[in-house]
Structures are given as structure tokens and as C-alpha cells.
Amino acid sequence: MNYREKALVFHCAEDTLLGILSVPERAEDTGVVVIVGGPQYRAGSHRQFVLLSRALASAGYAVLRFDYRGMGDSSGDARDFLGANADVAAAIDAMQTHMPNVRNVVLWGLCDGASAALLYCDETSDERVAGLCLLNPWVRSDASLARTQVKHYYTQRLLQRDFWYKLFSGKVAMKALSGLLRNLQMSAGRSSPSQVAASFQQRMARAWSCFPGGILLLLSGKDYTAKEFLGYAQSDPAWQAAWRHPKLSRHDLPEADHTFSDGQARRMVEQLTSDWLQTQAPIDNAPRQAPLVQSS
């Protein structure tokens, strides 16, 4: 399907945000808002967001990718995913202003972009958000990182002959040994996950469990962020209900890295997202609830 792209300038509080809207020739009533992760702008790693938007627009879905305040071509002070709610609300407003036929919005986020999508739902309960596409969600804490390193790095390292050779020959640096011991202590359970969980992880779990729409979860096999998320979500009581979400669709991509950087992994993400969007039923025809976070 043919599509076109146009630049949007919209407001968030006192600042001006810039986004690129991909408009299909015949748009579905569901649109996608891409939330960037980390200190990135609307192109994404390896132009991932550009190519994803074009692929989804070819399938009939309008897609908006935009810069947070203080990033890329948007004005204002830079902020991280914990302070992005107003930016997300402004982007949804802009999407529906320029695409009046779009009634339902899917939030698509990678890494802490996925976390930002959940935190937005937790704070606003915005009924315009009908679905979540979450890739390698970010839940990092010092303890969860230590457990992930012990499980997926040190366990393998301790089974390797050259490690023990270096250890007994004195070639393993004291700094490396200190790091190992520190991680073992943190991962040994001196603090339980619930005790060390920062508030944003708990809020993510609450949003996930309460979300009424569909959730697409994509996890990379070659990514510590994904492994850390799995370890955290499988051990923290707050996440137990989340795994039983009736509309959860999970796909593991064993050969993919964190940003799905090679062409094959990127195309798989595009196809899985497009296929999942086609299975999502419209939520209803009731008037949409305005978000509690004011974008301007």
C-alpha cells in the first residue's frame, strides 16, 4: 500500500515537539505511536523506527515517531523515560488531530521506551491506548543486574578451564575477583526482589496486570536487558499476575540482540508487529477518555 510521510510540530507544555507521521493510503482506525528508548531520537538505532514506521504504514497503519522534549529537534530540557508521560500524551493528541479516523492507539516501545509505555498507562489509564508492543523492557536495579550477570555470565565463566588457569596463575585481576564476589553477594538474596524494587518496576507491573488491551512482548535472546527482565518478572511477586494476562502474546527471538540490529531480526519485528496488529479487535465505539496527564 502506498503511504506518505509528513513532519508534525506539536506542543507539550511550553515546548515544541517534532514528529514524523507515516500516513497510509487507506488507514486503519488503529494507529501506532513509537516511544523512543534511551537517549535517542525519532530515527532509532540503525534507523529502526524509520523502517518500522514505513513497514507498518505499508500494511495500513498510521505511525507517529517523535522526539521527547530536549531530544533531537524538540525544544525543552532533556528528561528520561520516568518523565515522559506528558510527551506521550502530546504525541497521541497529535496523532488523532492529524488522523481523525484513528480511534485506537498502540504504544510501541523498546527498552525503557517499553517501560515508559507502561508507566504512561499506569498514570493516565488513557482509554485511547488499545494495545502495547513491548520489546526488551527495562527493569534494571543493582540487584537485578547482579543476578543476571551471575546467572548468564559468571556461571558460564566458572565452567571454563582458562578461567581457573588464570585464577591459579594469578592472571585474574583483583578487580575482576572483587566484582564477582560483589555480584554473588547481591544475587545471593541478601535483599529480596520486592525489597529492592524501585517504584517504577512496581508501577510497570501494575499497569501490565490492569491493562485491558492486548500486549505483544518481544524478547531478544542475546540481550542482558531481556534476561534481566525475565529474571525480575519471574521472581518478583508484583509480576506474577502480569504473566497471567489473558491477552499477552510473547515471542522470543533467540538470535536477536538488544536493538534487533541485523536485517533479519528487524524484519521479524516488523512482521510480528504487523501480524499482531491485525489480530487486535477494535475496543468499542464509546467516546475516548482524555488522559489525566495534560500535554499542553
Image (cartoon, rainbow, N blue to C red):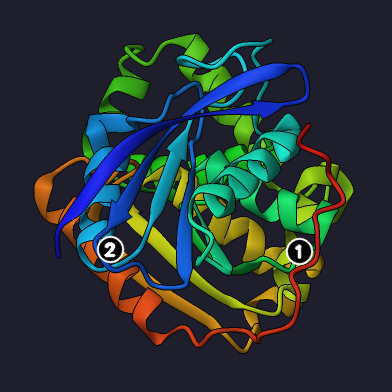
Q: What residue is rendered at 50% in x and 88% in y?
A: 281
Q: Is residue 157 above or below residue 155?
A: above
Asked if residue 114 can be seen in this view, the reply is yes
Residue at 36%, 23% in the rendered image: 167
The C terminus: image quadrant: top right
Q: Secondary structure at mark 1?
A: helix
**Can you name the residue that lies furthest to the left here?**
263
Left or right relative to 275: residue 95: right
| Closer to us: 148 or 20 | 20
The x and y percentages for residue 39 are 50, 21
Residue 126 x/y as whole percent? 76, 61
Please say whether residue 151 is visible from this viewpoint: no
Is the N terminus in the top left, top right, bottom left or bottom right quadrant?
A: bottom left
**What's the residue type where badge 1 is placed?**
Ala
| Above or below, comparing residue 6 to residue 126 in the picture | above
Q: Secondary structure at mark 2?
A: strand
Three-letter residue code for mark 2: Leu
Q: How many marks?
A: 2
For disc 1, the marked residue is 207
User: Is 287 positioned to the left or the right of 132 in the image?
Assistant: right
Question: Dot 1: few (<14), some (14–19), or many (≥20) neighbours within 10 Å?
Answer: many
Q: Which residue is mark 2?
A: 253
- The vertical placement of 194 against 218, above or below, is above
Q: Residues within 10 Å of mark 2 (few under 14, many from 20)?
A: some
Quadrant of residue 172 in the image?
top left
Quick one: 266 or 102, which is closer to the camera? 102
Percent x, y of residue 59: 23, 68
Q: Tell me what residue is drawn at x 28 percent, y 41 percent.
A: 5
Q: Nearer the viewer, residue 113 or 178?
A: 113
Q: CA distance from mark 1 to mark 2?
A: 25 Å
